[in-house]
Amino acid sequence: MLQIDKSQLNELKKALSSSKNIVITTHHNPDGDAIGSVLGLYHAFRAKGIDSRMVTPNGFPDFLGWLPDADKIMHYSRDKKDVEDLLSNADLLFCLDFNGFKRVEDMAEVLEKSPAKRVLIDHHPEPESPFHISISYTEVSSTAELVYEVIEQIYGESIINYESAVSLYTGIMTDTGSFSYACSRERTFAIAGKLIAKGVVVEDVQGLVYNNFSENRMRLLGFSLAERMKVYPEHRAACIWLSRNDLNTFKHQIGDTEGFVNYPLSIKGIVFSVLFTENEGFVKVSLRSRGNFPVNTFSKLYYQGGGHKNAAGGKAFMGMDEAVKQFEELIAKHSIELNS
């Protein structure tokens, strides 16, 4: 079991017992770990008789919409006034799967102004913003795994019901690529087993998440690999770039490009992969690596971002052609590291 600082847990338990307006939130463009963590904590609180509300900065992928009570999550991009009122009246705010206010983008100012005591539960390195209670451990596979540890150590695993279990399992499964990376700790599989014991059917969750895509998404993936992938074997690197026109052609929805960045890493010899997606005014950058090349450092240096050693994100404030050209120059600059 992960040994979380007892003073932090005691302070958190005390805050939970005295708080009346509890809000759970996560980062912009939430993924499976973010939504699974939010719902997992929400359902555990419900089982304990603790009321809470859930908020995300914007919407999330359709393939996560089946999770229990996912429809109760408020979106700041859609329910701006209601979310502002909720956060301004909150007295306890859980920030899950992000370590800096900039990760909630347009909701950052509202979050910072909230009078609530802020609780961080996250597995990203080096928290960037101030939190009253900080539960941050990089060695865990996912925030969902850490949420499980927090719940178990405060209230015991008996309050984790099926709804909480299936949400947390989904978070762990998606953030480890179905247990194919970032999951070499024995405890990760022990927790997965405990969640399965709560009634989670692995095959069903796998199917609902990974066999639940639209035809347009599948065609966009094919187009990305056939027409928009560049491979640089001399630098052991690759990239995929998608313009706004490309995304519009395939009727892109939130979450459609989830996982695209990992595909080039399946090519023999490639250890570094980047996905560029064009947005209004900037290019979103997703970075992945295998082995020792630290993409979080690379992202911090060149894309004003950060993340994990093998998974990070950032932004390039330039056009797509310039972003790809810059990437080619950067991998040449870091070629020795990439080839070592």
Image (spheres, rainbow, N blue to C red):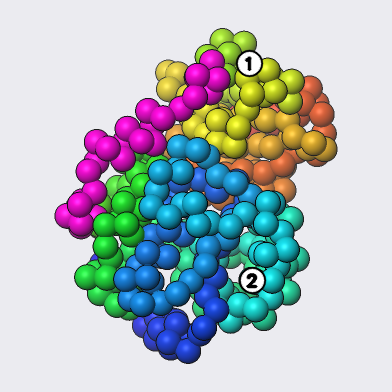
* Quadrant in the picture for residue 245: top right
Mark 1 and mark 2 in contact? Answer it, CB < 8 Å.
no
Q: Quadrant of the N terminus?
A: bottom left
How packed mark 1 is, by other alpha carbons closer than 10 Å (few <14, some 14-19, many 20 or more), is: some
Q: Is residue 234 visible?
A: no
Residue 166, how many percent across, how many down? 31, 51
Question: Does residue 280 sit above or below 264 in this rendering?
Answer: below
**Residue 234: quadrant of the picture:** top right
* Residue at image point 52% right, 67% down: 53
Residue 73 place in picture, x, y as percent: 53, 56
Identify residue type, mark 1. Arg
| Mark closer to the chain start, 1 or 2 | 2
Q: Residues within 10 Å of mark 2 (few under 14, many from 20)?
A: some
Q: Position of residue 155 (x, y in %)?
A: 29, 77
The answer to whether residue 54 is magenta is no
Query: In screen coordinates, is 161 left or right of 124?
Result: left
Residue corresponding to mark 1: 228
**Residue at the (41%, 65%) spot, across then down:** 41
Residue at mark 2: 86
Q: Is residue 270 above or below residue 97?
A: above
Residue 16 is labelled as: none
Instruction: Find residue 197 and report its horizontal and vertical position in percent.
Output: 17, 55
Give the left or right position of residue 53, taking residue 143 as reference: right
Inspect this view and state whether residue 240 appears. yes
The secondary structure making up most of the magenta span is: helix
Query: Which residue range is magenta in the image?
Result: 194-219
The amino acid on which the numbered mark 2 sits, given as a three-letter code, is Leu
